Amino acid sequence: MSFPLLTATAALPAIGAVATAAVPAARRSAAKWLALLVSLATLALAITVLVRFDPDGTRYQLTESHAWIKDFGVRYELGVDGIAVALIALTAVLIPFIILAGWHDADPLETGSRRWRPTQGFFALILAVEAMVVISFEATDVFLFYIFFEAMLIPMYFLIGGFGDRAHEHGEEAAATQRSYAAVKFLLYNLVGGLIMLAAVIGLYVVAGNFSLQEIAQARTNGSLHMATSTERWLFLGFFFAFAVKAPLWPLHTWLPNAMQESTAPVAVLITAVVDKVGTFAMLRFCLQLFPEASKWATPVILVLALISIVYGALLAVGQRDIKRLVAYASISHFGFIIMGIFAMTSQGQSGATLYMVNHGISTAALMLVAGFLISRRGSRLIGDYGGVQKVAPVLAGTFLIGGLATLSLPGLAPFVSEFLVLVGTFTRYPAIGVIATFGIVLAALYVLVLYQRTMTGPVKPEVSAMPDLRARELVVVAPLIVLLIFLGVYPKPVTDIVNPAVKQTMSDVHKSDPKPEVEAAK
Amino acid sequence: MSAAAVHSLWTTAAEPISKIDAPKIEYGQLSPTLIVVGAALVGVLIEAFVPRKSRYYAQVFVSVVALCAAFAAVVALAAGGYGTTKAHVAAMGAIAVDGPSLFLQGTIVLAGLVGLFTFAERRLDPAAHGNRVDSFAAQAAAVPGSDSEQAAVKAGFTTTEVFPLLLFAIGGMLIFPSANDLLTLFVALEVFSLPLYLLCALARRKRLMSQEAAVKYFLLGAFASAFTLFGIALLYGYAGSVSYARIAQVVDGTVTDVDPALANTMGNDALLLIGGAMLVMGLLFKVGAVPFHMWTPDVYQGAPTPVTGFMAAATKVAAFGALLRLLYVVLPGLRWDWRPVMWAVAIITMLGGAIVAITQTDIKRLLAYSSIAHAGFILAGVIATSKDGVSSVLFYLAGYSFVTIGAFAVVTLVRDAGGEATHLSKWAGLGRRSPLVAAVFAIFLLAFAGIPLTSGFAGKFAVFKAAADGGAVPLVVVGVISSAIAAFFYIRVIVLMFFSEPKPEGPTVAVPSPLTMIAIGMGVAVTLVLGVAPQYFLDLAGQAGVFVR
């Protein structure tokens, strides 16, 4: 038996989480270093996965399969396609930066009980989330996926509810109340989504008799497993609902602004750049493969919802006074693009959507982490409390600008490529929707540039006059992300090469081919 | 007169005597019950003859040995194939020795053992007058607040009778799910109910509340027993027999040898329907299903917490076992009549328990309503009327009972000056003070909520799968919705423990003896093992899913 690489990639952060949690209370910095090392080692494993993966090979590679719960027809089945590999790599790249950026976020303010160890908990929880996210990208057994899709909520919940910004405009008491409100809202939305999916998972078992993605998809293709149209649609809706909550898609999005606003910047990045990707990824992998007909049936409605997400998210982002809420609404707009790309059912659209997931992860991480550094200096999240930061902390302002420009998809930075692909892919099939979605880009320019203008330019506000520039640790976090943004903006081929074959297969699952280009005959 | 005639005179005289067969009792196959009841009798003798000082140790020793021996007997019987191939009806048709009985007996004995550890805990309350005390009243007969009560406390009396009472209750519970005729069922019901009524009244603190709980439990329980008995009488009128197999035959219409004396009433469907309904009502009362749940919150809150934990776990196991056997062995021919009713009961039980639990402010009442909601989930598996349904219920019960005992054991640890601090507001910030205790309780709550990788999830999945297979998809949808509602209040407790600031005059967490630690540790271990690697236990429950008739 060969080395179980995929299991190791998920197990390493899990073991690391336990080890970090077990570090004695006094050895706080040891816990941090341990967590960082584990995340770097996981990155090394993820790179190995990337290298060992052959884009032109079989669909699922590095597969592992073991019996697990025979009575439920559940197997421990892992396997990655190009889309999963790209997202695992994204996760593994971002986690070390998240840990570094949150280096001091969980230092206890005052020494409470001897046994109270928030720092250890914070880093252990981040690693636990990483482990669960990675295994949900790898799982090719629906039940196995479901378990980690749900279990992920618990560490996320503690990260949101347990750790917040030091400074809060209404004082510590109010901060704790709002945090726990945000955490509960996050949990309830996602738990309800997950439980509805559970009903659909049980339904799938009753219909198919097992949970293996490959077996079911194959049985559906060769006709040995027939689903009644209404059954397929109900099951699709059950799955899609959970993923749409997680992604999040309008009108199920309202938990995200609260959660991102109340959590610390690294956790906000973890939510939007890493955890939410599981939702969009699962639409591609499970909704389209298991229920191709129902996916096509639901496409018009989903496209309209995605369109609303794009425009509505962008419009609300323009109106925000709180930096983190602004980024949250911008993310909702971007998730609209991703979902639109997936359900446009063209290969450009789906490649674009996958690329978008990766790029959105990197660009949001850059913008949000720099915003976090900014907020921790001034102690306020309100845009109106800043002004003229550019003159005091030029490096901070510069990196913030690059993150912002990436968010608005400036050509030359990575998100441009993916947004362009999504729009092209949508336009070829649904021109009207493609046109309206373009307004999202215009609005993005508005909210990003206004944000930059109000916080960074203009006269220097007295409260920010003594603001220090980025420290070495913070530079280490930001610089590589910016390099990645520029590199993938100029040369996206490494990612598209991995993603494209997988997208082709997904397209063939739903029996869709790209529309033929039509050119009016020259007269 | 010939010699032969004389001889025939003797034989005719002897004939009536030879007609009464000596009852044939398979002592070996009944050994789990016999051991436990025997130990309970020994316990009574200990109360009478052993000096007061050493009674506690003697009782604990005898009880632990008996329960371990009973468990060993269950395992030996199961290994001997009595759960599968050699399953049969023993003791002249009174007791069924088959898969479900052995599985449930094993569960009850283990739950009883863990419950016993929490009964025997003597480190939580501060020592009174130099004597270590447990959760039970110094002298049950002393009027609360009277001089005689103070004298009893001062003298260091302890109610060591709780151990034999516990063993009697376990003995009854062992017979209850394996009873194979209605009279044995009723006797078992009373044998385990009466000690429980008594145990509920024995709290050391808040004695009036405890006694009130016991009176409520007793009155409502007696009422339910009356219903059960009336149902049994009507069923006897219907079938002319109290034997499960015989009633089932009459229901199916496959009886040939009708007793002429009974021919007139036999087969009267009104008797069958009313009798069956009353009998099921009595069992639903013990299970705590809506609308027969009214006693649950008060009794759970008032009873000494170790008793609550034991009762919540073991009674539910025993009662569901009996309900399963009744519906699957006696009334399967009637399932088109009882299924719609049970559907309704399951739906209102799941929703009712989950919704009312949201407004609770006392942790014990909260767990009581949660146990009602869980009864609803289990009923969904019962309704499946398939082999999968049986085994999913068995599996659910095994997982649930350990979580319950563990959770109530944690409740005993959180204390302030007035004893256990059960009001939820006092639990605020517990995660800051004692992260370990709060984390363990959080695991139990997550298991109750059915979060994946806990036994609660595996159990819930099993029963919902069985229900969906049996065509009860709407029931599964309601189950899923009430799980979401229920998750809300479990999560609220976790929020309170971890995200709220601790109050300055908040409760402290007592450091228990190894006994309670074992109880809690067993709970955590079973929760995680059944959650992560449930296959072995699913197999076990699957093999045990066939009733003997």
Image (cartoon, rainbow, N blue to C red):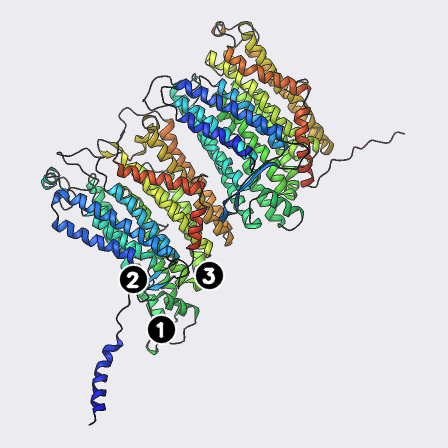
Q: CA distance from mark 2 to mark 1?
A: 23 Å
Q: What SS does tag 3 mark?
A: helix
Compared with residue A343, is residue A221 higher up or lower down, i.e. above or below? below
Q: Is disc 2 in contact with disc 3, using a CB cutoff of under 8 Å?
A: no
Compared with residue B495, is residue B101 higher up or lower down, i.e. above or below? below
Chain letter belonging to callout 1: B
What amino acid is at disc 3? Trp
Residue at 33 percent across and 32 percent down: it is B437
Q: What SS does tag 2 mark?
A: helix
Q: Which residue is mark 2?
A: B184
Q: Is disc 2 in contact with disc 1, using a CB cutoff of under 8 Å?
A: no
Q: How many marks?
A: 3
Q: Percent position (x, y) of residue B388?
A: 46, 54
Q: Percent position (x, y) of residue B4?
A: 23, 90
Compared with residue A107, is residue A437 higher up or lower down, i.e. above or below? below
Q: Is residue B294 visible?
A: no
What amino acid is at disc 1? Thr
